[in-house]
Image: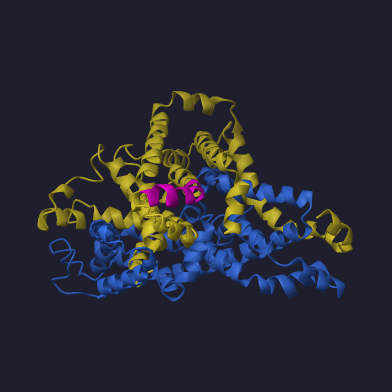
Chain colours: A blue, B yellow
Amino acid sequence: MSQLQQERSRSAGQATRAPATPAPGRRRAEAKRAAGRGFRKGTTWLLALVWLVVVAAPIYYMIVASIEPTSVYLSANPWFPTKGITGANYGAVFSSGIVSYFFNSVIVAGSTTILAVAVSLLAAYAIVVHGSRWTGIVFRCFMVGFAVPIQALMIPLYLAILRIGLYDSLLGLILPMAAFSLPITILVLVNFLRDVPRSLIDAMRVDGAGPLRVLLRLVLPLSWPAIATVGVFDLVTSWNNFVFPLILTQSPSQATLPLSVFNFEGNHLQNVPEIMAAVALSAVPLFVLYLVARRRLMAGLAAGLGA
Amino acid sequence: MAQTAGRRPRWIRGWWPAWFLLPPVALFAGFVVLPIVLAVLLSFCSWNGSSAIQFNGLANWQQFIHDSSALAALERTGVLVVASWLVQEPIALALGIFAAGRQRHRAVLTAIYFLPMLISAASLGILWNLLLSPVNGGVMYASTHFGLFFLDHQWLSDPDLVMGTVIVLVAWEFIPFHSLLFEAGTRQIPRSIYEAAAIDGIGPYRRFFRITLPMLRHTIVTSSTLNLVGSLTVFDLIYTLTSGGPGQSTRVLALAQYLEGFESLDFGYASALAVVLGVLAVIVSMLLIGVTGFGKMRSQSEGA
């Protein structure tokens, strides 16, 4: 059916272009081209389906393996639950305390996002509205942060967090995560604020509003789309951050989801279905977010990647 | 600009931005800039995590020059970076252009294509570790029961194969990100260019090489920068997948500096390796940004 629709839409497209064509000698060339188009289309769809299998098969496997009884996993077909399904693996994951890790992740990712966006908005507002040489220099300093990878700073961060007494605390995760989110958050907000009409700010200024008042009453309400976009990016990156909890926490009570899944694997080495259940559960929140706000999430990720 | 400056209210010219910039600058200075300085300083010190930090001059750097395992890690990192770029960019480009089509069934496929982006890299490492397990892992099962004989290898325990496995899995992880970039880039190409090309009777291959590819050049540079720096610093996936093993077969630089520090407790030497990693990342991004100009990269996305 979809094929048909496509066919129709294509012929419709040709019809609108038609007036130039009908020289009879061209008809054979036209047919040849159509055949070539069909071949290309076929190849495209074949490759698209191959990639679909490459992407979907591991995710499908994760779900199927997580509902197979652990007793039969090693002898059963792991791709199809032929020997019955069970929810026991998920029960085991829940009783391992995943709910508390989930809340740790909510606290860490939520606070990181709010903190990063709030201070970035202050910075972006000052940089754009003031627009002087020295705020420009500050802006460039933030942008240098893009080039510095987290992975190269694990040890000094560990040392710093240890020395200021924030080791093994959620706050000790939130502050560095927010700091590393600043470059991208500031860049996206600066680009957005540059498009806010100057005349609006001037109009408020004539009414005697100060910088803070203009920010709260004018710029903040206008900036919600940009805030949501970059906020989503910060949320996803901090939710999935594995390095910081790995090096900056040690007690299980401070672990976030990605680290807890890794620890869970270490403690259940023989039990593949239970590990799969843990991996699947850790992915559920972002999958849900993807379902309800796909467009926003994709826009956020694209913005975060510098598009 | 110059004329409006005179009419600007006093608060526009004042020092109030200093107060607004204080929180972000403090946060950035404390947790990004200070660690950069500390990393360099620590690379000239010895520290085992609990003892006092002691200056030991160039000892770590001399050790680095003579450490064949670190140099092998450097080489592995190079292979990973180059192979990742070669594998990921063409596939991501093709997928991005495909995803930019507006038909409904493409949208459904694309929605699935982007799923790997949502799973944390650590979870992906665990997932693939189990999938590739020789003990009834899904891939092993498929090779013996579904007739996919070419899958019948020790993907994670054969030292000659495992780096290839890592390259493929890193590609699996990152291709969705890059195809998302290319999708956005392709959608920004004005339709009118293609319509004009169609009227001129330009074929699909020339259309791709003469229109699509040149119009995507900024996206290609952005994506390549992120790709090179990203694969230079891949850590989570390899750590949860193989921890650098078997032996040292997948011990890339990012892993080497972590293991030297947090497992061997030689934080001074690990810092030297981390500095090498950081400098390489800065050089790569500076080179690529220098080629295009950071401002250009920005103004292009603004203008579109």
Residue B20 drawn at (x, y percent):
75, 61
| Relative side of B269 to B25, left or right | left
Quadrant in which the N terminus of chain B appears: bottom right
In the image, residue B82 above or below residue A171: above
- Depth order, front residue of A231/A113: A231
Give the overall secondary structure of the magenta segment: helix
In the image, residue B119 above or below residue A97: above
In the image, residue B58 above or below residue A242: above
Q: Which residues are magenta?
A: B206-221
Counting labels gives 0
Identity of the residue drawn at 34% across and 40% down: B250
Residue A46 drawn at (x, y percent):
24, 59
Quadrant in which the C terminus of chain B appears: bottom right
Quadrant of the image occupied by residue A67: bottom left
Identity of the residue drawn at 58% across and 28% down: B56
Quadrant of the image occupied by residue A114: bottom right
Residue B141 drawn at (x, y percent):
15, 56
Identity of the residue drawn at 78% across and 49% down: A134
Magenta stretch encompasses residue B212: yes
- Depth order, front residue of B172/A89: B172
Residue A56 drawn at (x, y percent):
28, 63
| Relative side of B293 to B110, left or right | right
Q: In this orientation, does residue A30 appear?
A: no
